[in-house]
Amino acid sequence: MAEEGSSLARKALRSSYISTVFSISLVLFLMGMLGMLLLNAKRISDYVKENLTITVMLKAEATDDDITSMTKNLEGNTFVRNVQYVDKDSAAKNLQAELGEDFVSFLGYNPLLPSLDVQLKAEYATEENIAELQKMLVQNSLVKETYYQQSLITSITKNIRNISLIILGFSALLFFIAGALINNTIRLALYSKRLLIKSMKLVGATRNFIRKPFLVKGILQGLYGAIIADLMLLILFYYAKKEVSELMFLEDLPSTGIVLASVIVLGIFISGFSTYFAVNKYLRQRTEDVY
Amino acid sequence: MFTRKKFNSFCRKPARSKKPVCLPYRKTGSGKSSLLKVLYGDIKITQGEGSVAGYNLVKLKNKDVPFLRRKLGIVFQDFQLLGDRTVKDNLMFVLHATGWEEKGKMNDRINDVLNKVGLSTKGFKMPHELSGGEQQRLAIARALLNDPELILADEPSGNLDPETSNEIMNLFFELSKTSCSVIMATHNYSLIERYPSRIVKIDLGKVTEAN
Protein backbone atom coordinates (compact mmCIF):
# COMPACT_ATOMS: atom_id res chain seq x y z
CA MET A 1 0.00 0.00 0.00
CA ALA A 2 2.71 2.38 1.04
CA GLU A 3 4.86 1.25 -1.88
CA GLU A 4 2.00 1.86 -4.25
CA GLY A 5 1.38 5.29 -2.79
CA SER A 6 4.96 6.34 -3.24
CA SER A 7 5.21 5.17 -6.83
CA LEU A 8 1.92 6.91 -7.61
CA ALA A 9 3.22 10.10 -6.07
CA ARG A 10 6.41 9.79 -8.06
CA LYS A 11 4.44 9.20 -11.27
CA ALA A 12 2.28 12.24 -10.60
CA LEU A 13 5.39 14.31 -9.92
CA ARG A 14 7.08 13.14 -13.10
CA SER A 15 4.02 13.81 -15.24
CA SER A 16 3.69 17.32 -13.83
CA TYR A 17 7.36 17.88 -14.60
CA ILE A 18 6.92 16.63 -18.16
CA SER A 19 3.81 18.72 -18.74
CA THR A 20 5.62 21.81 -17.48
CA VAL A 21 8.47 21.16 -19.92
CA PHE A 22 6.00 20.62 -22.75
CA SER A 23 3.98 23.75 -22.12
CA ILE A 24 7.23 25.70 -22.08
CA SER A 25 8.32 24.10 -25.34
CA LEU A 26 4.99 24.73 -27.10
CA VAL A 27 5.01 28.40 -26.19
CA LEU A 28 8.63 28.74 -27.26
CA PHE A 29 7.85 26.94 -30.52
CA LEU A 30 5.22 29.55 -31.38
CA MET A 31 7.63 32.32 -30.43
CA GLY A 32 10.30 30.81 -32.67
CA MET A 33 7.90 30.58 -35.61
CA LEU A 34 6.90 34.21 -35.31
CA GLY A 35 10.52 35.23 -34.84
CA MET A 36 11.46 33.45 -38.06
CA LEU A 37 8.65 35.22 -39.93
CA LEU A 38 9.61 38.57 -38.49
CA LEU A 39 13.29 38.21 -39.36
CA ASN A 40 12.45 37.10 -42.87
CA ALA A 41 9.71 39.58 -43.70
CA LYS A 42 12.54 42.06 -44.10
CA ARG A 43 14.53 39.62 -46.19
CA ILE A 44 11.64 38.99 -48.55
CA SER A 45 10.97 42.67 -49.01
CA ASP A 46 14.69 43.33 -49.44
CA TYR A 47 14.84 40.61 -52.03
CA VAL A 48 12.03 42.16 -54.03
CA LYS A 49 13.35 45.69 -53.61
CA GLU A 50 16.86 44.77 -54.67
CA ASN A 51 15.58 43.11 -57.81
CA LEU A 52 13.52 46.13 -58.74
CA THR A 53 15.11 47.54 -61.88
CA ILE A 54 15.14 51.12 -63.10
CA THR A 55 15.75 51.06 -66.81
CA VAL A 56 17.64 54.06 -68.16
CA MET A 57 17.22 54.34 -71.91
CA LEU A 58 20.16 56.00 -73.56
CA LYS A 59 20.20 57.96 -76.76
CA ALA A 60 21.60 56.10 -79.76
CA GLU A 61 24.49 58.49 -80.14
CA ALA A 62 26.00 57.63 -76.75
CA THR A 63 29.54 56.33 -77.18
CA ASP A 64 31.16 53.53 -75.21
CA ASP A 65 33.24 56.06 -73.27
CA ASP A 66 30.11 58.00 -72.33
CA ILE A 67 28.48 54.85 -71.12
CA THR A 68 31.49 53.70 -69.09
CA SER A 69 31.81 57.01 -67.33
CA MET A 70 28.08 57.13 -66.67
CA THR A 71 28.14 53.61 -65.25
CA LYS A 72 31.04 54.58 -63.01
CA ASN A 73 29.20 57.67 -61.95
CA LEU A 74 26.04 55.71 -61.10
CA GLU A 75 27.96 53.03 -59.22
CA GLY A 76 29.37 55.77 -57.00
CA ASN A 77 25.85 56.81 -56.01
CA THR A 78 24.92 55.79 -52.46
CA PHE A 79 21.49 54.45 -53.50
CA VAL A 80 22.80 52.16 -56.20
CA ARG A 81 23.61 48.53 -55.66
CA ASN A 82 24.30 47.40 -59.21
CA VAL A 83 24.43 48.85 -62.70
CA GLN A 84 24.31 46.71 -65.77
CA TYR A 85 24.84 47.89 -69.31
CA VAL A 86 22.55 46.30 -71.89
CA ASP A 87 23.70 47.11 -75.45
CA LYS A 88 21.45 47.17 -78.49
CA ASP A 89 22.16 43.63 -79.57
CA SER A 90 21.54 41.94 -76.24
CA ALA A 91 18.39 44.07 -75.78
CA ALA A 92 17.20 42.77 -79.13
CA LYS A 93 18.01 39.20 -78.12
CA ASN A 94 16.06 39.56 -74.88
CA LEU A 95 13.04 40.99 -76.64
CA GLN A 96 13.25 38.35 -79.31
CA ALA A 97 13.18 35.65 -76.68
CA GLU A 98 10.15 37.31 -75.07
CA LEU A 99 8.22 37.82 -78.31
CA GLY A 100 9.30 34.59 -79.93
CA GLU A 101 9.70 36.44 -83.23
CA ASP A 102 12.78 37.53 -85.15
CA PHE A 103 11.74 41.16 -85.43
CA VAL A 104 15.22 42.44 -86.40
CA SER A 105 15.29 40.53 -89.67
CA PHE A 106 11.59 41.36 -90.14
CA LEU A 107 12.21 45.09 -89.77
CA GLY A 108 15.57 44.99 -91.43
CA TYR A 109 17.23 46.98 -88.60
CA ASN A 110 17.40 47.02 -84.78
CA PRO A 111 15.13 49.78 -83.43
CA LEU A 112 16.13 49.27 -79.82
CA LEU A 113 18.27 51.63 -77.79
CA PRO A 114 21.08 50.70 -75.45
CA SER A 115 20.12 50.97 -71.76
CA LEU A 116 21.44 50.75 -68.23
CA ASP A 117 19.65 48.51 -65.70
CA VAL A 118 20.03 50.12 -62.31
CA GLN A 119 19.25 48.20 -59.12
CA LEU A 120 19.06 49.96 -55.79
CA LYS A 121 20.11 49.00 -52.30
CA ALA A 122 17.07 47.77 -50.37
CA GLU A 123 17.24 50.43 -47.68
CA TYR A 124 17.15 53.23 -50.31
CA ALA A 125 14.46 51.74 -52.54
CA THR A 126 11.77 54.27 -51.71
CA GLU A 127 9.68 56.27 -54.12
CA GLU A 128 11.28 59.57 -53.11
CA ASN A 129 14.79 58.28 -53.73
CA ILE A 130 13.83 56.84 -57.07
CA ALA A 131 12.20 60.13 -58.11
CA GLU A 132 15.34 61.99 -57.12
CA LEU A 133 17.52 59.61 -59.05
CA GLN A 134 15.27 59.90 -62.09
CA LYS A 135 15.41 63.69 -61.99
CA MET A 136 19.17 63.58 -61.88
CA LEU A 137 19.36 61.10 -64.76
CA VAL A 138 16.98 62.97 -67.03
CA GLN A 139 19.16 66.07 -66.79
CA ASN A 140 21.94 64.09 -68.45
CA SER A 141 21.86 64.80 -72.20
CA LEU A 142 22.59 61.19 -73.08
CA VAL A 143 19.50 59.87 -71.30
CA LYS A 144 16.36 59.55 -73.33
CA GLU A 145 14.05 58.39 -70.61
CA THR A 146 13.88 56.28 -67.45
CA TYR A 147 11.16 54.01 -66.22
CA TYR A 148 10.39 51.47 -63.53
CA GLN A 149 7.35 49.66 -62.21
CA GLN A 150 6.04 52.23 -59.83
CA SER A 151 3.04 50.27 -58.59
CA LEU A 152 5.24 47.36 -57.56
CA ILE A 153 7.43 49.32 -55.22
CA THR A 154 4.48 51.12 -53.65
CA SER A 155 2.54 47.97 -52.95
CA ILE A 156 5.54 46.05 -51.68
CA THR A 157 6.65 48.78 -49.31
CA LYS A 158 3.14 49.19 -47.97
CA ASN A 159 2.26 45.53 -47.61
CA ILE A 160 5.53 44.47 -46.11
CA ARG A 161 5.33 47.25 -43.59
CA ASN A 162 1.78 46.28 -42.64
CA ILE A 163 2.59 42.61 -42.38
CA SER A 164 5.72 43.29 -40.35
CA LEU A 165 3.77 45.49 -37.96
CA ILE A 166 1.09 42.88 -37.51
CA ILE A 167 3.64 40.15 -36.88
CA LEU A 168 5.54 42.39 -34.51
CA GLY A 169 2.34 43.09 -32.60
CA PHE A 170 1.56 39.40 -32.40
CA SER A 171 5.06 38.63 -31.25
CA ALA A 172 4.86 41.19 -28.47
CA LEU A 173 1.49 39.80 -27.41
CA LEU A 174 2.73 36.25 -27.57
CA PHE A 175 5.79 37.18 -25.57
CA PHE A 176 3.55 38.36 -22.74
CA ILE A 177 1.34 35.32 -23.02
CA ALA A 178 4.41 33.10 -23.04
CA GLY A 179 5.78 34.75 -19.93
CA ALA A 180 2.47 34.58 -18.11
CA LEU A 181 1.81 30.99 -19.13
CA ILE A 182 5.23 29.66 -18.21
CA ASN A 183 5.21 31.69 -15.01
CA ASN A 184 1.85 30.24 -14.08
CA THR A 185 2.85 26.67 -14.85
CA ILE A 186 5.96 26.97 -12.72
CA ARG A 187 4.12 28.63 -9.87
CA LEU A 188 1.56 25.86 -9.83
CA ALA A 189 4.29 23.25 -9.84
CA LEU A 190 5.99 25.03 -6.95
CA TYR A 191 2.76 25.48 -5.03
CA SER A 192 2.83 21.75 -4.38
CA LYS A 193 6.29 22.23 -2.85
CA ARG A 194 5.35 25.00 -0.45
CA LEU A 195 5.11 22.71 2.57
CA LEU A 196 8.49 21.25 1.72
CA ILE A 197 9.94 24.74 1.53
CA LYS A 198 8.35 25.56 4.86
CA SER A 199 9.85 22.49 6.51
CA MET A 200 13.25 23.37 5.08
CA LYS A 201 12.98 26.83 6.57
CA LEU A 202 12.10 25.41 9.97
CA VAL A 203 15.23 23.29 10.23
CA GLY A 204 17.48 26.30 9.75
CA ALA A 205 18.28 26.24 6.02
CA THR A 206 19.16 29.63 4.57
CA ARG A 207 17.11 31.05 1.71
CA ASN A 208 19.90 30.62 -0.79
CA PHE A 209 20.36 27.01 0.19
CA ILE A 210 16.67 26.25 -0.30
CA ARG A 211 16.46 28.22 -3.53
CA LYS A 212 19.44 26.70 -5.31
CA PRO A 213 18.09 23.25 -6.21
CA PHE A 214 14.78 24.77 -7.31
CA LEU A 215 16.57 27.26 -9.53
CA VAL A 216 18.75 24.59 -11.09
CA LYS A 217 15.67 22.54 -11.83
CA GLY A 218 13.81 25.54 -13.24
CA ILE A 219 16.66 26.45 -15.55
CA LEU A 220 16.97 22.85 -16.71
CA GLN A 221 13.22 22.79 -17.36
CA GLY A 222 13.54 25.89 -19.50
CA LEU A 223 16.52 24.41 -21.32
CA TYR A 224 14.77 21.10 -22.06
CA GLY A 225 11.64 22.94 -23.19
CA ALA A 226 13.73 25.15 -25.46
CA ILE A 227 15.58 22.19 -26.95
CA ILE A 228 12.29 20.46 -27.73
CA ALA A 229 10.98 23.69 -29.27
CA ASP A 230 14.13 24.00 -31.39
CA LEU A 231 13.77 20.44 -32.63
CA MET A 232 10.15 21.11 -33.59
CA LEU A 233 11.21 24.29 -35.40
CA LEU A 234 13.92 22.44 -37.32
CA ILE A 235 11.44 19.77 -38.38
CA LEU A 236 8.99 22.48 -39.45
CA PHE A 237 11.67 24.29 -41.47
CA TYR A 238 12.75 21.07 -43.12
CA TYR A 239 9.27 20.23 -44.32
CA ALA A 240 8.44 23.80 -45.24
CA LYS A 241 11.51 23.95 -47.47
CA LYS A 242 10.66 20.62 -49.03
CA GLU A 243 7.09 21.60 -49.82
CA VAL A 244 7.61 25.23 -50.84
CA SER A 245 10.93 25.57 -52.61
CA GLU A 246 10.55 29.35 -52.88
CA LEU A 247 11.24 29.64 -49.14
CA MET A 248 14.90 30.09 -49.89
CA PHE A 249 15.34 32.15 -46.74
CA LEU A 250 15.25 28.95 -44.69
CA GLU A 251 18.68 28.23 -46.05
CA ASP A 252 19.88 31.41 -44.48
CA LEU A 253 21.90 30.02 -41.59
CA PRO A 254 22.46 33.21 -39.52
CA SER A 255 18.79 34.06 -39.13
CA THR A 256 17.83 30.44 -38.39
CA GLY A 257 20.66 30.35 -35.88
CA ILE A 258 19.51 33.58 -34.28
CA VAL A 259 15.98 32.23 -33.88
CA LEU A 260 17.09 28.88 -32.45
CA ALA A 261 19.56 30.50 -30.05
CA SER A 262 17.11 33.12 -28.84
CA VAL A 263 14.51 30.40 -28.20
CA ILE A 264 17.00 28.72 -25.86
CA VAL A 265 17.96 31.97 -24.13
CA LEU A 266 14.31 32.92 -23.75
CA GLY A 267 13.40 29.52 -22.34
CA ILE A 268 16.11 29.61 -19.70
CA PHE A 269 15.42 33.26 -18.89
CA ILE A 270 11.65 33.00 -18.43
CA SER A 271 11.78 29.69 -16.60
CA GLY A 272 14.65 30.77 -14.34
CA PHE A 273 13.07 34.05 -13.35
CA SER A 274 9.64 32.55 -12.77
CA THR A 275 11.17 29.91 -10.52
CA TYR A 276 13.16 32.51 -8.64
CA PHE A 277 10.13 34.66 -7.92
CA ALA A 278 7.81 31.78 -7.12
CA VAL A 279 10.27 30.26 -4.64
CA ASN A 280 10.88 33.65 -3.09
CA LYS A 281 7.18 34.04 -2.51
CA TYR A 282 7.12 30.91 -0.36
CA LEU A 283 10.41 31.77 1.29
CA ARG A 284 9.10 35.13 2.44
CA GLN A 285 5.83 33.75 3.71
CA ARG A 286 5.32 33.29 7.43
CA THR A 287 4.74 29.67 8.23
CA GLU A 288 1.06 29.93 9.00
CA ASP A 289 0.30 31.72 5.73
CA VAL A 290 1.41 28.67 3.80
CA TYR A 291 -1.85 26.81 4.36
CA MET B 1 -1.82 37.49 23.68
CA PHE B 2 0.34 36.85 26.68
CA THR B 3 2.00 39.87 28.16
CA ARG B 4 5.46 40.35 26.80
CA LYS B 5 7.15 40.97 30.10
CA LYS B 6 5.95 37.81 31.73
CA PHE B 7 6.86 35.89 28.65
CA ASN B 8 10.32 37.36 28.63
CA SER B 9 11.10 36.53 32.21
CA PHE B 10 9.82 33.07 31.51
CA CYS B 11 11.86 32.41 28.45
CA ARG B 12 15.16 33.20 30.06
CA LYS B 13 14.75 30.53 32.70
CA PRO B 14 14.63 27.25 30.83
CA ALA B 15 18.12 27.69 29.48
CA ARG B 16 19.42 27.57 33.03
CA SER B 17 17.52 24.60 34.36
CA LYS B 18 17.61 21.50 32.27
CA LYS B 19 14.25 20.33 33.52
CA PRO B 20 11.53 20.01 30.93
CA VAL B 21 8.88 22.66 30.88
CA CYS B 22 5.30 22.01 29.99
CA LEU B 23 2.98 24.70 28.73
CA PRO B 24 -0.55 23.48 29.23
CA TYR B 25 -3.43 25.56 28.01
CA ARG B 26 -7.16 25.39 28.30
CA LYS B 27 -8.52 26.69 25.08
CA THR B 28 -7.36 26.96 21.55
CA GLY B 29 -6.11 30.38 20.66
CA SER B 30 -4.56 31.06 24.03
CA GLY B 31 -1.20 31.81 22.47
CA LYS B 32 0.75 28.64 23.09
CA SER B 33 1.85 28.10 19.50
CA SER B 34 2.44 31.81 19.07
CA LEU B 35 4.76 31.73 22.05
CA LEU B 36 6.80 28.96 20.46
CA LYS B 37 6.76 30.82 17.13
CA VAL B 38 8.24 33.85 18.84
CA LEU B 39 10.95 31.61 20.24
CA TYR B 40 11.96 30.24 16.85
CA GLY B 41 11.72 33.56 15.07
CA ASP B 42 8.56 33.16 13.05
CA ILE B 43 6.77 36.02 14.87
CA LYS B 44 8.53 39.24 15.69
CA ILE B 45 8.38 40.81 19.13
CA THR B 46 6.97 44.29 18.79
CA GLN B 47 7.49 45.51 22.34
CA GLY B 48 9.40 44.43 25.41
CA GLU B 49 12.44 42.24 25.07
CA GLY B 50 13.49 38.62 24.85
CA SER B 51 16.39 36.47 23.86
CA VAL B 52 16.87 32.83 22.93
CA ALA B 53 20.15 30.96 22.62
CA GLY B 54 22.12 34.18 22.49
CA TYR B 55 19.90 35.84 19.88
CA ASN B 56 18.10 39.02 20.77
CA LEU B 57 14.55 38.44 19.55
CA VAL B 58 13.82 42.15 19.22
CA LYS B 59 16.75 42.85 16.96
CA LEU B 60 16.45 39.57 15.10
CA LYS B 61 16.86 40.08 11.34
CA ASN B 62 15.39 37.84 8.65
CA LYS B 63 18.80 36.62 7.62
CA ASP B 64 19.61 35.59 11.19
CA VAL B 65 16.52 33.43 11.59
CA PRO B 66 18.04 30.31 9.98
CA PHE B 67 21.05 30.57 12.29
CA LEU B 68 18.86 30.93 15.36
CA ARG B 69 16.95 27.82 14.29
CA ARG B 70 20.20 25.86 14.03
CA LYS B 71 20.65 26.35 17.77
CA LEU B 72 17.16 25.10 18.49
CA GLY B 73 15.52 21.79 17.80
CA ILE B 74 11.91 22.14 16.73
CA VAL B 75 9.38 19.29 16.91
CA PHE B 76 5.83 19.68 15.66
CA GLN B 77 2.54 17.95 16.09
CA ASP B 78 2.49 17.29 12.33
CA PHE B 79 6.17 16.27 12.15
CA GLN B 80 7.12 18.56 9.21
CA LEU B 81 9.32 15.98 7.57
CA LEU B 82 10.48 16.27 3.96
CA GLY B 83 8.07 13.81 2.40
CA ASP B 84 9.95 13.45 -0.86
CA ARG B 85 13.07 11.74 0.50
CA THR B 86 14.14 8.91 2.78
CA VAL B 87 14.73 9.09 6.53
CA LYS B 88 18.46 9.34 5.98
CA ASP B 89 18.12 12.02 3.30
CA ASN B 90 15.86 14.01 5.60
CA LEU B 91 18.67 14.16 8.11
CA MET B 92 21.27 14.62 5.38
CA PHE B 93 19.39 17.68 4.11
CA VAL B 94 19.59 19.32 7.51
CA LEU B 95 23.30 18.61 7.78
CA HIS B 96 23.95 20.00 4.30
CA ALA B 97 21.76 23.01 5.02
CA THR B 98 23.57 23.75 8.24
CA GLY B 99 27.02 23.67 6.75
CA TRP B 100 28.35 20.18 7.35
CA GLU B 101 30.77 18.98 4.71
CA GLU B 102 32.61 15.80 5.60
CA LYS B 103 30.69 12.75 4.41
CA GLY B 104 32.04 10.43 7.07
CA LYS B 105 31.23 12.72 9.96
CA MET B 106 27.76 13.34 8.56
CA ASN B 107 27.01 9.62 8.36
CA ASP B 108 28.32 9.11 11.88
CA ARG B 109 26.14 11.90 13.18
CA ILE B 110 23.06 10.52 11.44
CA ASN B 111 23.64 7.03 12.86
CA ASP B 112 24.18 8.64 16.24
CA VAL B 113 20.85 10.44 16.39
CA LEU B 114 18.94 7.55 14.80
CA ASN B 115 20.33 5.32 17.55
CA LYS B 116 19.27 7.79 20.18
CA VAL B 117 15.65 7.69 19.05
CA GLY B 118 15.67 3.97 18.23
CA LEU B 119 15.33 4.19 14.45
CA SER B 120 18.77 2.87 13.50
CA THR B 121 17.32 0.26 11.15
CA LYS B 122 14.89 2.53 9.29
CA GLY B 123 17.27 4.88 7.48
CA PHE B 124 16.23 3.76 4.00
CA LYS B 125 12.47 4.21 4.51
CA MET B 126 10.32 7.03 3.23
CA PRO B 127 8.60 9.09 5.95
CA HIS B 128 5.13 7.93 4.92
CA GLU B 129 6.24 4.32 5.39
CA LEU B 130 6.83 4.97 9.09
CA SER B 131 4.22 4.87 11.82
CA GLY B 132 3.20 8.12 13.50
CA GLY B 133 5.42 7.44 16.50
CA GLU B 134 8.37 6.66 14.26
CA GLN B 135 7.83 9.82 12.26
CA GLN B 136 7.84 11.85 15.44
CA ARG B 137 11.03 10.14 16.54
CA LEU B 138 12.57 11.02 13.21
CA ALA B 139 11.54 14.62 13.81
CA ILE B 140 13.21 14.48 17.20
CA ALA B 141 16.33 12.90 15.69
CA ARG B 142 16.40 15.76 13.21
CA ALA B 143 16.06 18.26 16.03
CA LEU B 144 19.04 16.67 17.78
CA LEU B 145 21.42 16.77 14.79
CA ASN B 146 23.12 20.05 15.65
CA ASP B 147 23.29 19.57 19.43
CA PRO B 148 20.63 22.20 20.14
CA GLU B 149 20.69 24.24 23.31
CA LEU B 150 16.93 24.02 23.47
CA ILE B 151 14.26 21.78 22.00
CA LEU B 152 10.87 23.32 21.28
CA ALA B 153 8.06 20.80 21.00
CA ASP B 154 4.65 21.95 19.88
CA GLU B 155 2.18 19.25 20.96
CA PRO B 156 4.55 16.49 19.93
CA SER B 157 2.14 13.78 21.01
CA GLY B 158 -1.00 15.40 19.62
CA ASN B 159 -1.29 13.00 16.68
CA LEU B 160 -0.22 9.87 18.52
CA ASP B 161 -1.96 7.15 20.49
CA PRO B 162 -1.46 7.12 24.29
CA GLU B 163 1.16 4.40 24.28
CA THR B 164 3.26 6.05 21.60
CA SER B 165 2.77 9.35 23.39
CA ASN B 166 4.38 7.82 26.45
CA GLU B 167 7.34 6.64 24.41
CA ILE B 168 7.85 10.09 22.97
CA MET B 169 7.48 11.68 26.39
CA ASN B 170 10.05 9.26 27.82
CA LEU B 171 12.39 10.23 25.04
CA PHE B 172 11.97 13.93 25.81
CA PHE B 173 12.43 13.30 29.50
CA GLU B 174 15.58 11.39 28.83
CA LEU B 175 16.91 14.18 26.61
CA SER B 176 16.12 16.84 29.17
CA LYS B 177 18.21 14.96 31.70
CA THR B 178 21.17 14.26 29.47
CA SER B 179 21.60 16.78 26.68
CA CYS B 180 19.46 19.89 26.48
CA SER B 181 16.52 21.88 27.76
CA VAL B 182 13.09 21.02 26.43
CA ILE B 183 10.09 23.29 26.20
CA MET B 184 6.98 21.36 25.35
CA ALA B 185 3.52 22.71 24.74
CA THR B 186 0.59 20.44 25.40
CA HIS B 187 -2.98 20.49 26.64
CA ASN B 188 -2.84 16.93 27.79
CA TYR B 189 -3.12 17.14 31.58
CA SER B 190 -2.62 13.45 32.19
CA LEU B 191 0.74 13.61 30.46
CA ILE B 192 1.71 16.53 32.64
CA GLU B 193 0.79 14.64 35.75
CA ARG B 194 2.75 11.61 34.69
CA TYR B 195 5.89 13.54 33.87
CA PRO B 196 6.42 16.05 36.62
CA SER B 197 8.38 19.08 35.53
CA ARG B 198 8.31 22.82 35.70
CA ILE B 199 4.89 23.87 34.46
CA VAL B 200 3.90 27.22 33.01
CA LYS B 201 0.28 27.93 32.29
CA ILE B 202 -0.92 30.05 29.45
CA ASP B 203 -4.46 31.18 29.94
CA LEU B 204 -6.16 34.01 28.11
CA GLY B 205 -2.80 35.10 26.81
CA LYS B 206 -1.19 35.32 30.26
CA VAL B 207 1.76 33.23 31.33
CA THR B 208 1.70 32.07 34.93
CA GLU B 209 3.94 29.74 36.87
CA ALA B 210 1.86 26.76 38.02
CA ASN B 211 4.09 25.06 40.55
Image (cartoon, coloured by chain):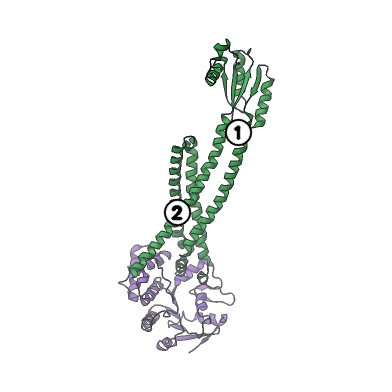
Chain colours: A green, B purple
Local secondary structure at mark 2:
helix
| CA gap, disc 2 and disc 1 | 40 Å
Q: Is residue B189 visible?
A: yes
On the picture, is A131 further left or further right than A185? right
Q: Amino acid at mark 1?
A: Glu
Q: In the rendered image, which quarter is residue A4 located in?
A: bottom left
Vertical side of B59 occupied by B11: above or below: below
On the picture, is B86 further left or further right than A216? left
Residue located farthest toward the top when viewing the structure as drawn: A108
Q: Are marks 2 and 1 in contact (CB under 8 Å)?
A: no
Q: Is residue A125 visible?
A: no
Q: In the rendered image, which quarter is residue A221 located in?
A: bottom left
Q: Earlier in the sequence, mark 2 or mark 1?
A: 2
Local secondary structure at mark 1:
helix
Vertical side of A120 occupied by A65: above or below: above
Residue A41: percent from left, percent from top = 55, 39
Q: Chain of mark 1?
A: A
Image quadrant holding the N terminus of chain B, namely bottom right
Residue A284: percent from left, percent from top = 53, 65
Q: Residues within 10 Å of mark 2 (few under 14, many from 20)?
A: some
Residue A248: percent from left, percent from top = 48, 35
Q: In the rendered image, which quarter is residue A88 located in?
A: top right
Residue plotted at (38% across, 68% down): B91
Given residues A100 and A290, the one toward you in this image is A100
Vertical side of B57 occupied by A22: above or below: above
Q: Chain of mark 2?
A: A
Q: Mark 1 — residue?
A: A123
Residue B32: give its label. none
Residue B179: percent from left, percent from top = 39, 77
Q: Mark 2 — residue?
A: A22
Q: Amino acid at mark 2?
A: Phe
